[in-house]
C-alpha cells in the first residue's frame, strides 16, 4: 500500500508514490547535522506524466524540492511536509521506471516533522480519530506533536464548517488545564475530532477571518468548566494565564459569545 505521495514543488505535478520512507517512519528522523536528513523512499513508482514533463523541458529526469504528502488508508492526503534535497537528484539514463525503486536522498525540511507527530501520523494513516479528546492521555511533548498534526491536517480536513456564521459550538473542558490543552479542545469544538482552530494567539485570530472553519460571530459553549473558572485556577502557570486572558479578550472583540 502506498503511504506517501510526492508532488513537485515547482510544477505541481505528481512525482510518484512510495510504500514507506526509511528515516521518517517508525523511528526518529535520521538527522546528520542541523536540517540535514537522510531518507530513503521505498517502493517509489515515478509517475509517467512527470517523466514526460522532465523530458520535454530538459534532457534529464530529476527531483528537486517536493511536498511529501502523507496518505490515509483511503489513499487521500492527510498531511504534508516540504523536503528539499541538498543537491538536484538526476536519475541514471538506464533507470527502469516500469519497476518500483528505492531512492536515497539527503536534504532538509522547511519544517522538520517531530518524532511525536510521526507517531500520531502513523495511527492516522490507519484511521483518523472519530471521537474527541484522544489527545487527553498524552504528555505535553506528545500534545505538541498533536498540535503539529492537526495544524498540517487542517487543509485536508473535509469536516470543516467552511466560514459558517452564527453557529453554536461546544467545547469540552474536561481535560483542559493549560493553554496547550485549550487549543487542542478548541480545535475539536470547532472542527470535530482531530480538528484545528489555531495553536497560538495569532493563529486563532487568523482562523477568525475564515478558511479554517466557522467565522465570528458565533456562540462558544463551555462544558464541564467555563473559561473563567480555568483562568481563576491557582495551578495555572503565569504565562498560560496571560495568554488565556488575552484569548478571552480576543473572543469578545471578535463577537464570539462565551456561554
Image: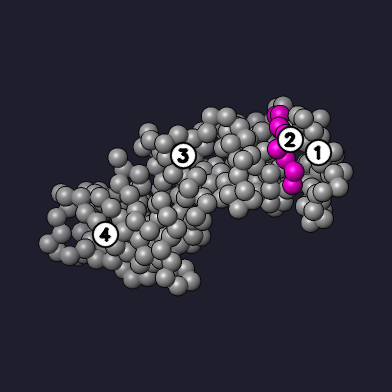
What element does badge 2 sit on? loop
Mark 1 or 2, nearer chain start? 2
Q: State how many labels appear.
A: 4
- At horizontal 47% and vertical 45% (from top left) the residue drawn is 121
Residue 173: in magenta span: yes
Range of residues picked out in magenta: 169-178
Q: Residues within 10 Å of mark 2 (few under 14, many from 20)?
A: some
Per the rendering, the mark at residue 157 is none
- At horizontal 49% and vertical 35% (from top left) the residue drawn is 128
Name the front one of labels 2 and 4.
2
Q: Position of residue 57 (x, y in %)?
A: 25, 61
Q: Which residue is mark 2?
A: 173
Q: Nearer the viewer, residue 159 or 238?
A: 238
Name the front one of labels 3 and 4.
3
Q: Position of residue 126 (x, y in %)?
A: 41, 36
Q: Which residue is mark 1?
A: 227
Q: Is residue 239 above or below residue 125?
A: below
Q: Is residue 191 above or below residue 85?
A: above
What element does badge 3 sit on? helix
Q: Which residue is mark 4?
A: 103
Amino acid at each position: 500500500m502506498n503511504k506517501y505521495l510526492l508532488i513537485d514543488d515547482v510544477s505541481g505535478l505528481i512525482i510518484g508514490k512510495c510504500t514507506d520512507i526509511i528515516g521518517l517512519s517508525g523511528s526518529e528522523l535520521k538527522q546528520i547535522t542541523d536540517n540535514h536528513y537522510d531518507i530513503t523512499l521505498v517502493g517509489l513508482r515515478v509517475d509517467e506524466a512527470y517523466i514526460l514533463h522532465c523530458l520535454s523541458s530538459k534532457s534529464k529526469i530529476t527531483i528537486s524540492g517536493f511536498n511529501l504528502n502523507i496518505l490515509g488508508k483511503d489513499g487521500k492526503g492527510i498531511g504534508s511536509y516540504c523536503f528539499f534535497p541538498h543537491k538536484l537528484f538526476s536519475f541514471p539514463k538506464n533507470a527502469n521506471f516500469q519497476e518500483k525503486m528505492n531512492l536515497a536522498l539527503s536534504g532538509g525540511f522547511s519544517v522538520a516533522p517531530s518524532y511525536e507527530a510521526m507517531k500520531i501520523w502513523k495511527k492516522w494513516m490507519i484511521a483518523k480519530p472519530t471521537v474527541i479528546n484522544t489527545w487527553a492521555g498524552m504528555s505535553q511533548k506528545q500534545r505538541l506533536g498533536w498540535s503539529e498534526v492537526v495544524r498540517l491536517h487542517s487543509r485536508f480536513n473535509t469536516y470543516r464548517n467552511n466560514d459558517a456564521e452564527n453557529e453554536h459550538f461546544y467545547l469540552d473542558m474536561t481535560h483542559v488545564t493549560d493553554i496547550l490543552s485549550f487549543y487542542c479542545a478548541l480545535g475539536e469544538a470547532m472542527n470535530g475530532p482531530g480538528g484545528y482552530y489555531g495553536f497560538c494567539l495569532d493563529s486563532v485570530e487568523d482562523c477568525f477571518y475564515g478558511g479554517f472553519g466557522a467565522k465570528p460571530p458565533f456562540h462558544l459553549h463551555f462544558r464541564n468548566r467555563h473559561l473563567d473558572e480555568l483562568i481563576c485556577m491557582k495551578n495555572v502557570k503565569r504565562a498560560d494565564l496571560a495568554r488565556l486572558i488575552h484569548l478571552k479578550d480576543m473572543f469578545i472583540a471578535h463577537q464570539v459569545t462565551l456561554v
